[in-house]
Amino acid sequence: MKSTRFTFRFAGATLAAAAGLSLWAPVKPFSLLQSEAAVQQPEGYDDEKWARLLDDTLEYEEIPDLIEFFNPSYRSAADAVESNLKDSYELVEKMREDGKEYRQQAKGLEAEGDQIYSAQYKAMGRSLSSAASTMEKALDKQARRLDQNTLAPIRYQLSSAVQSLFIGYKQMEVNREMLEKMTELYTDMLSMSNTQSGIGMATSTDLLSAQVSLTSAKNQLSTLNNSMDSLRRTLIMLTGWDYTDNPVLGEVPEPDMSWIDSVDREADKVKAIAYNQEIISLKNTKKENRTVKDIHSKERSVTDAEEQLRSNMDTLYYNLLEKRAALQAAETALSQAELTWQGNQRRYQLGMLGRIEYLSTEIQYIQAKAARDTARMNMLQALNEYSWALKGVVPTDL
């Protein structure tokens, strides 16, 4: 299960070990990480929210926080840097304590009438306190800068990827539900076909078709279950559980399609460029003894990267519109399939429709429902991709 782990505080943020660190590489087992340090609730973190984060339910909305506090690779990287900076912050505290001690000694000397040494000790105390404050501000500034430019992009990338995996798993659940129901219905249809074949009311072709459909559904279901097990283990390990744990996976939220209408495409492009690490790196690239050609080359690289990102943002926006239209079409198709199925239910109850025909329309309804749920997942994924792009995470397959 998840275990809270100590986080050394500096400017309310944690730092990464280095840019480009692979957070998918093998790390120490989580059970070992659990035993290395006790967990404390982060300062300022809501009690109720923290309790939910520690329960045995993996909620979609919790993924960014689960990555920040419990992803083994991310925590390993952040803790390594925290350990390095810990000495600096401890030095700040030591300077403050020394300054306080000098001021106390100054009071004692002043009480004894030794004004000269008292003044010297006061000055030393003020100097140490001032130096401690200056050093802490510099460390906090460095922490904020590194968090913004190094660790935050890694958190965003991991959070985006894990949310996509979560949506993918929930899509598999939709498919599994459909295949389980279809297997049940195809079994019923095969039994009916066997009975009708025995009395000459079904052909060998009908029987073979029912057998093929049932076998196909069973094979797909078996393959899907294996894939789901593998993906589920990946999901829970990335969010801080051990691979043997069995947390509940919550539901995905309903996609907010109205959000699309509030999109300011040009403003969003500016924001995406400001947070994109590739562009930031290009702008920050420095070279000794740069020539005019080098400067122009750098400017051209930055311009090309910005134009490509603007194009990618347009692609992501049009993908939003496409997925919204697909979801609306899928909802219409489901409504029609449901009406047809309800009508056939009444016809079947009145004896106006055969069992196999009735089961066929039920399968069509189940398929339409799965198509609607798939379109809903695709809409949520499109919204995610656009939202994360505003924080610098752009899909690589554009």
Image: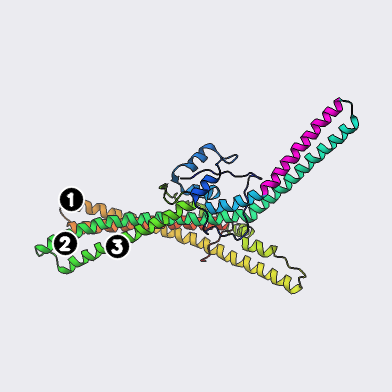
> Distance from label 2 to label 1 (Cα)?
20 Å
Judging from the image, what secondary structure is the residue with disc 1 in? helix
Give the number of the mark in front: 3 or 2.
3
Instruction: Give the amino acid at mark 3.
Output: Asn
Residue bearing the label numbered 1: 349
* Residue closer to the observer: 39 or 214: 39
Q: Can residue 333 be seen in this view?
A: no
Residue bearing the label numbered 3: 219
Judging from the image, what secondary structure is the residue with disc 3 in? helix
> Distance from label 1 to label 3 (Cα)?
33 Å
- Residue at the spot 51% in from the left edge and 49% down from the top edge: 32
Instruction: Give the amino acid at mark 2.
Output: Ser
Give the number of the mark in front: 1 or 3.
3
- Residue at the spot 29% in from the left edge and 62% down from the top edge: 219
Upstream in sequence: badge 2 or badge 1: 2
Most distant residue in the right direction: 116
Residue 368 lies in the magenta-colored region: no
Q: Is residue 280 visible?
A: yes
Q: Tell me residue 53's x, y (percent).
A: 49, 43
Q: Where are the magenta residues, as a range?
A: 85-111
The reply, left or right, for residue 366 in relation to residue 87 is left
Instruction: Give the amino acid at mark 1.
Output: Gln
Q: Tell me residue 140's x, y (percent).
A: 69, 47
Q: Quadrant of residue 362?
A: bottom left
Residue 96 lies in the magenta-colored region: yes
Decide: marks 3, 2 in contact (CB < 8 A)? no
> Distance from label 3 to label 2 (Cα)?
21 Å
The kind of secondary structure the magenta stretch mainly shows is helix
Q: Tell me residue 130's x, y (percent).
A: 79, 41
Residue bearing the label numbered 2: 193
The reply, left or right, for residue 363 in relation to residue 53 is left
